[in-house]
Image (spheres, grey):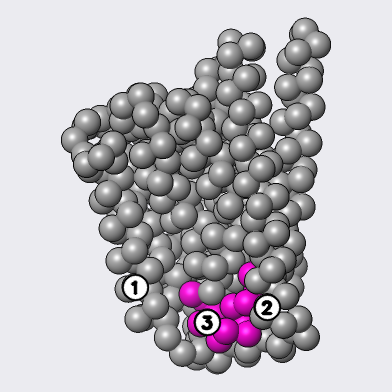
Amino acid sequence: MSILIWYIILIFFLAAALSAYAATRLSSHADTISRETKLGGVLAGTLLLAVATSLPELTVTISAGVIGNAGIAVGNGLGSILFNFFVLFILDLHFRNKRLFLDVSDHHIQTGIVALILCLTTAGALAIKSTWGFYNIGVFSIAIVFVYIFGMWFMSRKQQGPTKNKDNTIEEEPVKSKDSVKRAIRQFILFSVIILITGTALSLSGDALAQNTGISATAIGSILVALSSSIPDAMSVYVALKLTNVNMAIGTILGSNLFNILVIALADPFYTEGSIWQDSSDELMFMSFIGFSLTALTMIIIKRDKTKNTTTYVIPSVIAVVSYFVVVGMFIF
């Protein structure tokens, strides 16, 4: 490989490392804000913390739209969804003896319903490739924003009050941090700016890799860039499951997936070469259906109350992990 490609790769991984660090710190301050302002437990994880750890996807997707690379913009959003599920289920296999998913709040079902609707809307946008819209914003992008906002309102109405687990025990409120809300907000803004810069660098270097290596922008966006921008989510889920806080782990993953679809719609007006959905690869529609299937599988696991043994418990997670490798293999080969 030429020196230029090695230089681009170096920038890519430096930006990914800085983005992961900033998003991890951002998650901590978002948690402080959510507790000090008394947001609901599951809703805070689904909305504020999920958005905080998903800011790399936001900056990457929008900057990809600005530079006119629809493959990276849409591929990053959908690829991040698949990688998030991969992380969730691979960690469930790691902690399989604890069988953490058997004691999860049913509140996540509402988040899952919204996610299913968004996945179907995205698949429809990629299949129809409509150019209809208003002021360079496609009609499907408008629909996604509407569904997201309505979904957040719906969940806030359903998830008011303390979170209850399947055994009807109330999840305890965390101890308040000594950090003030003002300090947490200042730090939140600071690390948001860092993520804005590193996310843009990820998008630009990913676009440069596609142009200089011959690898398709769809493959780079849906695998390499998506993996790099989703590292903060992976770290947050690992810590949550290690502390047996499975509600926060699932809330972060499902909430992040909702946001990852939203950011594609938000990138649409920045894509000035037409419709971001029209110029995306047909392969990404298949990725939308995989995201739909893994969301449905997660909802089935949440509703499961018991299992005979560890072997039967891990079957859904094994299916999800294998599905991820199959999809990645299809895009590479």
Specify the principal SS of the magenta part: helix
Tell me which residue sits at (76%, 52%) in the image: 21
Q: Nearer the viewer, mark 2 or mark 1?
A: 2
Q: Is residue 162 above or below residue 299?
A: below
Instruction: Please tell me how crowded label 1 is: few (under 14), some (14-19), or many (20+) other residues with Cα within 10 Å.
Output: few
Give the image quarter of residue 57: top right
Which mark is first along the chain, 3 or 2? 3
Circles 2 and 3 in contact, beta carbons < 8 Å: no
Q: Are marks 2 and 1 in contact (CB under 8 Å)?
A: no
Q: Position of residue 212 (x, y in %)?
A: 63, 11
Give the residue at mark 2. 182
Q: What is the total number of numbered labels drawn onto the structure image?
A: 3
- SS for dot 2: helix
Task: Kindly identify which residue carries mark 1.
Answer: 153
Where residue 41 appears, as percent x and y from the top left, is 55, 80
Q: What residue lies at 57% left-to-right and 84% top-to-bottom?
A: 37
Tell me where residue 241 sits by quadrant.
Answer: bottom right
Placement of the C terminus among the 4 image quadrants: top right
Residue 136 higher or lower than 57, as above or below: above
For the record, the magenta segment spans 30-43
Q: Which residue corresponds to the image point at 51% horizontal and 32% vertical from the top-left?
A: 64
Looking at the picture, which amino acid does disc 2 mark? Answer: Lys
The image quarter containing residue 26 is bottom right
Read off the residue under disc 3: 39
Q: How far is mark 3 from mark 1, CA to CA?
A: 13 Å
